[in-house]
Amino acid sequence: MDGSGKTTQLRLLDNWLRGRNVEAILTRQPGGTATGDRIRALLLDSKSAGLDSRTELAMMFADRAQSIAEVIRPALDAGKLLLCDRFIDSTEAYQGGGRQLGSELVLAMHRLVCGDLQPDLTILLLPNIEVCLTRARRRNQRASGQTSSQAGNQATPDEDRFEREQDGFFQRVHQAYRAIAQREPVRVITIENPGDVQAVHRELITRVEPRLRAAGILR
């Protein structure tokens, strides 16, 4: 979820792997390609507030198709390890759950666009919603130059379109993520209520390292 610290943890994991002579390709969605970055800018722009939910879903998969063509397939075909900041689970949670389009539609779109492509392992950081929103808004306050006293707990002008959603939206996203984790307990590693950055990193490594060794990525 936004504000969970996932991007920070992904970079720390990448650094940890490099320290063990394992090179990974680091990417994100939406974005990660020139076309994807333009799609991302439209999706996150608060001026796109009137974007229809199905249009939003189609844009997410347009971004993903380009990412697969330019980044993911070439990396996998070359035998590279790929670390991706968001993939299908995020779309199922945000568009399927948050936008209430439903998992069935999202997963049908995934099969159409991505075929049988699935992550081997998903790391889900799941703090409570209030923590996520507070972190996200503080981040945007820093970016806009506002202080906490100036902005309070309100959305800032620079806050992206998703972060401006109401609490009910994030409740549905949170529930959808939890449902995905329960449905796929082997693939999805869940870290509840992540706090201190280094403590979360240590827990993440403790849980991920055996999987990497079993896959022959670490020796």
Image: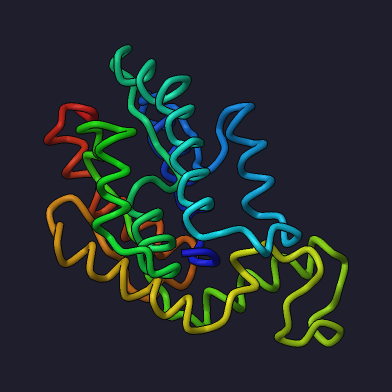
Up-down relation of residue 171 to residue 51 (above or below): below
Where is residue 57? Give x, y as percent: 46, 51
Where is residue 8? Give x, y as percent: 53, 53
- How many discs appear? 0
Residue visible at 38% across and 69% down?
100
Q: Quadrant of residue 153?
A: bottom right
- Residue 39 in the figure: left or right of residue 72: right
Up-down relation of residue 188 to residue 142 (above or below): above
- Residue 204 in the figure: left or right of residue 37: left
Between residue 11 and residue 98, name the one nearer to us.
Answer: 98
Between residue 211 and residue 92, name the one nearer to us.
Answer: 92
Where is residue 197? Give x, y as percent: 49, 63
Where is residue 168? Give x, y as percent: 47, 83
Up-down relation of residue 117 to residue 165 (above or below): above
Of the 4 image quadrants, the one containing the C terminus is top left
Between residue 123 and residue 43, name the one nearer to us.
Answer: 43
Q: Quadrant of residue 171?
A: bottom left
Q: How is the rendered protein coloured?
A: rainbow
Residue visible at 17% across and 35% down?
213
Residue visible at 72% across and 62% down?
46
